[in-house]
Each structure stands twice: as structure tokens, then as C-alpha cells.
Amino acid sequence: MTQDSSLTAAACIIGDEILNGKTQDTNSHFLAQFLFKLGIELKRVEVVNDDMDTIADTIQRLSNEHDIVFTSGGIGITHDDISYAAIAKAYQLELKLDNDTYERVEAMLNKRKITQRKGYERLAMFPFPAELLRPQQSFLIPVVIVNQNIYILPGIPRLFQLLIESLESHLQQLCFKKLGKQIVGFSRTDIATQKSEGAIASILSTIQARNGNLKIGSYPLMGNKDISVIVSVVGKNHDAVESVAQEIVKEINGWTLSENNSNNNNNNNNNNKAHL
């Protein structure tokens, strides 16, 4: 996507439970929505198993290719929670106990009257050196930042979401530092039409060729008697997005969808989309 200046991001979702179907990943979806509103372009999402070398190799590659990398999963007290160790290995760092975090862990264990404490120190064993970011002091574990652009986060959805949301101000400041200006979020306008995708394909291609700073996507629906295709126009210039959307409305005999209607159509028809 050719866009006005933006940082790029990647996500590495870690866990055998994702790959064997036991757990459905929701963190990448949440991250995508968060970054879209913030104005950081999520370019890639990869899912890897609980293997030390696989995690290390994947993280190194993603870090080299993107401005920011977010990880999800592999943080805990058992043998298969190896994200910190794998990323430390990738950059030849030692694992070091963070006393502040471990004191918080001990306080949590005391509060819950947990006496079996084997393995809990793993929650506070971080790659060193690293930046430990705790935007809210109530958080048990911090966001651990390695290599200046790798943000290591837990996989539990509620914790992941809280930590991601807490990074908003930090990421805005990071973007300003790298781009020299305030970051602008992406805008999206969705257009519905009863015409087939084949009937509108050349029209969309022509309009896309004239608007390199926007992304026009076509998403056919199956089993919807009112809508055959939803066309999305995405970009950072809100006025440009709206202008092109109105042009498409006229050219394909369509109509714009409200945000609620657009979300409902996306949620209800994910399994019926013919986009391969």
C-alpha cells in the first residue's frame, strides 16, 4: 500500500495452541484495529510454534523488515513459555531477573495465598539489556522492548489488549520522533453495490491507478440478497478517501455504508466472502 508517511509494523503470534486449533487468535485482530486507528501500517502477521529457534529467527527477520514488531504469547510459568528466552537468544542477551517485577509477582501470590511458587520467577526473567515499559503502575508485568523495536507481550487476550491500549501515547511519540510530525490515523469508507465483482473490476482498477496514496479493496459477499460486493477505500487523507468513495458510488451504482452497517456485514459474512 502506498500511503502518506507511516511506520510499518508486524506481529508474531506465538503458541502451539494457535496452530493446532485449540485456541483462536484474537490478538492480531485487535492489534490490527488499534494500529489502523493510530495510523501505523500493519504489514504482516505470522504465527509460529513454541520452538526456540523458530521464534528467534522469525523475530529477527520481522525486526529487520519493519519499524515495530509486536509479539503475543509464550509468557508464563511453564516449560513451553519461552518467548523471553528465544528473543534473548536471537540477540545474544542474557536473561536477568527484574526485582521490581518479581516483587509485584510475590505480592500477587501473597494476596492470592498461593504457596506453590515454582516457575513464577519466569514472569520476571527478561532479556537484558531491554527497556521495560509499564505505562500503568498497576500492571503486573511490563512491556519488554528489545532491539529498540520488538515489543514482547503476553498472549492472554485481556492482558494483551490492556497493554496495547496503554502504549498509545508511547507509539504516538515514537512516530513523531521518527517521522517529524504527528501521526494521523487511517480512514476507511465502505461502499456496497448489487453489481458483480466482474462488472466493476475495470472501474476500480482505473480509479486505483489514479490514486496511489489510497488502497481500494473489493470484497464479494455470498448469500446476501441485498449486497453483492463491498468496496473499501482506505487512506490517511480523509477528504481524499471520501472524494474517491463518492466517485466509486456513482460509477458502480452503489451506496456508502455506515460504520455500524459495515461492521455488521463484515462480521456476519466473513464465512461467506468469495475473496480467495
Image (cartoon, helix red, strand yellow):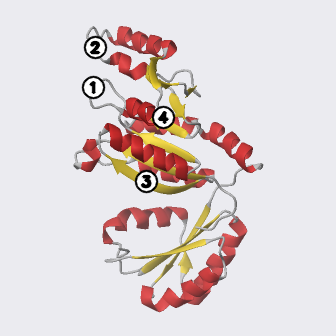
The tag earlier along the polypeptide, 4 or 1, is: 1
Q: Which mark is residue 78?
A: 1
Q: Disc 3 marks which residue?
A: 45
Quadrant for the N terminus, please.
Answer: bottom right
Instruction: Tell me the amino acid under the disc marked 1.
Output: Thr
Mark identifier at residue 91: 4
Residue type at mark 4 is Tyr
**Which of 112 and 255 lies nearest the eye of the viewer?**
112
The image quadrant of residue 213 is bottom right
**Mark 4 and mark 1: Cα distance apart in space:** 23 Å
Q: Quadrant of the C terminus?
A: bottom left
Of badges 4 and 3, nearer the viewer stands 4
Give the mark nearest the N terminus, 3 or 1. 3
* Mark before the other along the chain sequence, 1 or 2: 1
Q: Element under label 3?
A: strand
Q: Are marks 3 and 1 in contact (CB under 8 Å)?
A: no
Task: Indicate the amino acid at tag 2.
Answer: Lys
Q: Label 2 belongs to which residue?
A: 118
Residue at point 57% right, 26% down?
136
- Apparent side of residue 240 relative to residue 249 in the rendered image (left or right): right
Quarter of the figure with residue 275: bottom left
- Category of crowding for the residue at label 2, using alpha-carbon neighbours closer than 10 angstroms: few (below 14), some (14–19), many (at least 20): few
Foreground: disc 4 or disc 2: 4
